[in-house]
Image: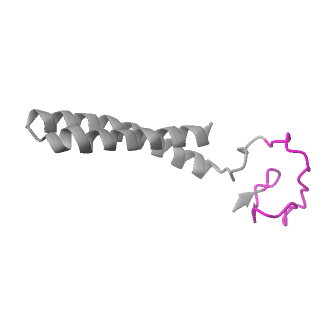
């Protein structure tokens, strides 16, 4: 689902003319409306979801470090040296994707 930059009406991603207001998208790729992102349909709800997901990834990365250190302190080497770092890097990767899509 995409949104028209003029009337904010919903439209199909393959449509080149808005069915609500008739806005015709220019053929050049250098044109970008105020609220659009490069090839993604943008909405305030999507922006809020990306922000919340970014915060969750940050807390998840810090949490995995704390849990990993706690597991090492208790002598659980598998969780401390294997599962903890894998979880940390997965959270870090998600954070990078969320931030790249957001900006």
Colouring:
one colour
Task: Tell me residue 52's x, y (percent).
Answer: 47, 44
Residue 66 position within the rendered picture, expressed as x and y whole percent measured from the top left: 23, 34
Residue 61 percent coordinates (x, y): 35, 37
Q: Can the viewer see residue 71 in this picture?
A: yes
Give x and y (percent) for residue 44. Answer: 62, 48
In front of the other: 65 or 51: 65
The residue under the point 55% across, 38% down is 99
Q: Residue at x 89, y 56 (%)?
A: 23
Q: Which residues are magenta?
A: 4-33
User: Residue 56, located in which quarter of the rendered image?
Assistant: top left
Q: Residue placed at 19% from the left, 44% from the top?
A: 79
The quadrant the N terminus occupies is: bottom right
Quadrant of the frame with the C terminus: top right
Horizontal arrangement in the rendering, residue 93 relative to residue 28 (left or right): left
Is 49 colored magenta in this rendering? no
Q: Is residue 67 visible?
A: no
Residue at 90% x, 45% y is 28
Point out the residue furthest to the left here: 74
Q: Main secondary structure of the magenta part?
A: loop
């Amino acid at each position: 689902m995409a949104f028209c930059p003029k009337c904010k009406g919903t439209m199909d991603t393959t449509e080149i003319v808005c069915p609500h207001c008739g806005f015709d998208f220019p053929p050049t790729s250098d044109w970008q409306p105020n609220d659009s992102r490069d090839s993604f349909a943008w909405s305030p709800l999507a922006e809020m979801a990306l922000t919340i997901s970014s915060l969750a990834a940050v807390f998840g990365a810090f949490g995995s470090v704390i849990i990993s250190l706690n597991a090492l302190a208790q002598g659980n080497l598998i969780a401390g040296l294997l599962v903890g770092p894998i979880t940390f890097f997965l959270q870090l990767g998600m954070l990078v994707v969320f931030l790249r899509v957001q900006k």
